[in-house]
Amino acid sequence: MKRFAVAVTAILVLALSALPALANKFEDIKKKGVLVAGVKDSQPPFGYVDEASKQIVGFEIDLMAAIAEKMGVKLEIKPVTSSTRIPMLSQGEIDVVAATMTHSRERDKTIDYSITYFSTDQKLLVKKDGGIKSIKDLAGKKIGSAKGSTSEKNAKAAQPQATIISFETYPEAFLALKQGKVEAVTTDEAILHGLRNKDDKPDDFAVVGEAISAEPYGLGIVENESKLRDAINFALMDLWTEGKYQQIYNKWFGKDTKYYIPLTWTMELWP
Amino acid sequence: MHWDVVWNNMSYLLLGAYPKGPLGGLALSIVMALVGIFGAFWLGLLVGVFRLSKKAWLRVPALIYIEIIRGTPLLMVIFWFYFLAPVVLGKSLPGEQAAMIALIVFTSAYIAEIVRAGVLSLPKGQMEAARGSGLSHTQAMIYVILPQALFNMIPSFVNQFVSLTKDTSLGFIIGVTELTKAATQINNRTMNAPSEIFIAIAAMYFLICYVLTAFSRRLEGKINRYQARGR
Amino acid sequence: MAYQFDWGLVVSGEYGVMLADGLVTTLKISALSIALSLTLGTIVCVMRLTKVKALEWLSASFTEFFRNTPLLVQIFFWYFGSAAVLPVSWNKWLYAQDFEFAAGVISLTVYTAAFIAEDLRSGIYAIPKTQLEASRACGLSFLQAMGYVILPQAFRIIIPPLISQFLNLIKNSSLVMTIGVMDLTYMARQIESQTFHGFEAFTAATLIYLSISLLVSGAIQIYNVRVLRLGR
């Protein structure tokens, strides 16, 4: 009995002492030569599985590849969802989150963020003939969103009389809208356009309403890794000034694409 | 109906991004099921034998383990290993590993109960005779009791492995790209054929599980005949 | 980064209420599904024994199919896939109701009914055949013989496996969170994503599930010993 107790204690002590020693993530990444980014795999055009190549592709993947190139390392991607991205980052399974994540104060308590790399507003996606014009029309109705997102909370605050139904991903929420299970899907305008334009009949749907909230996307970085954060911020700014950012943006959101959204904001640039 | 969506994505459903990327889809489900079956069998056997032990310090922890796991939904066990292992272990577990460990731990508690039931259903004389012929308790267990008990319980094991195969679908919730996740990825991209996609993957799971179930039934018949002859 | 525990979070205030709401939903969906699956399972089992080929075949395919496919896939099918299968007017009406809850109940009911039908069938096989023949000879119809003679005995035999099916159902109900039913697991996950205190939330949820299971199996133990005078 006693020996057993000793063994258990020893294992516990070992496990606890294995807690992260003071590390410098940036140096680690350089040494490994690999930057591991958590990206969406169900969110066209930010990140989704391409039918032909079966690889995850998208705006955020291209952006991360460019950042990794600037840092002189290879990019490895791992799929995340709205509810798994922060735990995976804090656990060190990924180095950076590039998954349509809004920079919020609440989240900033747990992780750090890069400067804004994409800016959008939270709006509503509805059926065109459904008679919904703004969030006010949704009292007593069902709204679809995704688990662990800011949209979920914002919608509840903006329309307390609605029921928010949260799915694993936004396309599932959109499917629920198509089938009439919810009256609206709410999240960032860029995602809503992506959902709408991906559909067989985009004209049946419309993005409506005034902005429920501003949604600046930042790349999520583990708390207190300032060297890594600097490297990523500098890479982002360089990409913008070199015009590489705009090139990637136009590839996914340009005029000729299914997801056309004009580039109306400018990145914060440090001299 | 849009069955073409299913056909066009068949290789993704079967293999995931392999060979250009990580293995996924049905192939990953099968790998997870096989690893799970292997791990759960041995862990379950160990816990089951502990549960039968006369020593309280082996029996009581085994009992607590079995009762806690069997009283908890598998989804919770998966969350434990995925979200919470880092807090306890100080080390993160990738989704595939977390799911497989959770499946092993979860199924082992049920296997342990099957082992126990198998041993208890043997006549007491077996143990007494084995001990009488000079074997130690452990030797008697390994050479006499367990082989018979495990043989009799083969159908129950197979049923438990069918459950485990179905349970690999829960890997979806923590982002493991097994068959169910692959299907939802395709569904989320195409969004015009949910019924077809889910019917297709249901048929794939059914095929595997039905073959296992049918196999277990045949074995059951054979074992019953064997026992009838023996008596 | 060291993890700061905050147990107060899950036992009081906004998040305590969320967990309590989730528990109520879990109990509601489980109770309804248990009642329905028992009914459906009995019907399916009796169909198997009617000696009418079409009914037998239907019953066998029902049990084989639903037992051998994952519950999660069935939940997705009923929730997302049923739109294409059912008539439009039915869908309209369904979606106006609490369809997430309904789809959850349907999935859990159908899945568990397949297992109950099999358990019940083995219970019936344990009853000597002569019982059915004797009741038929007394002038009872097949259904009367089933309802008054065979099933009451079979149910008594299968009480233990039946209870474990019900316990499985309660545990399986955690899967309905994937289609947005706000049950206990959904709420635990919500708290995790809003506060990043997953440890506390999942511990609380696990303990609640565990207490339900232990309470039910404890009650059965007492029933077995006191009422049926089984065991030691």
Image: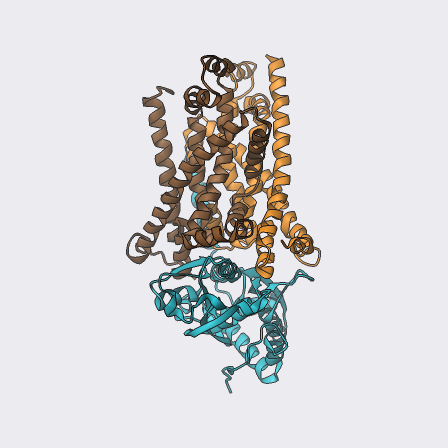
For image coordinates 51% across by 55% down, the residue present is B92
Q: Is residue B28 above or below residue B65?
A: below
User: Which colouring convention does the figure follow?
Assistant: by chain
* In-front residue for pair A13/B73: B73
Q: Is residue A143 above or below residue B183?
A: below
For image coordinates 30% across by 52% down, the residue present is C11
Q: Colour of chain B?
A: orange
Q: Quadrant of the C terminus of chain B?
A: top right
Instruction: Kindly indicate which chain is depicted in brown in the rendered structure.
Output: C
Res B70 visible:
no
For image coordinates 57% across by 78% down, the residue present is A235
Q: Colour of chain A?
A: cyan
Res A265 visible:
yes
* In-front residue for pair A23/C226: C226
Residue B79 rendering spot, x and y as whole percentages: 47, 50
Q: Quadrant of residue B40?
A: top right
For image coordinates 36% across by 43% down, the residue present is C27
Residue C103 rendering spot, x and y as whole percentages: 46, 48
Residue C24 rendering spot, x and y as whole percentages: 34, 47
* In-front residue for pair C200/B190: B190
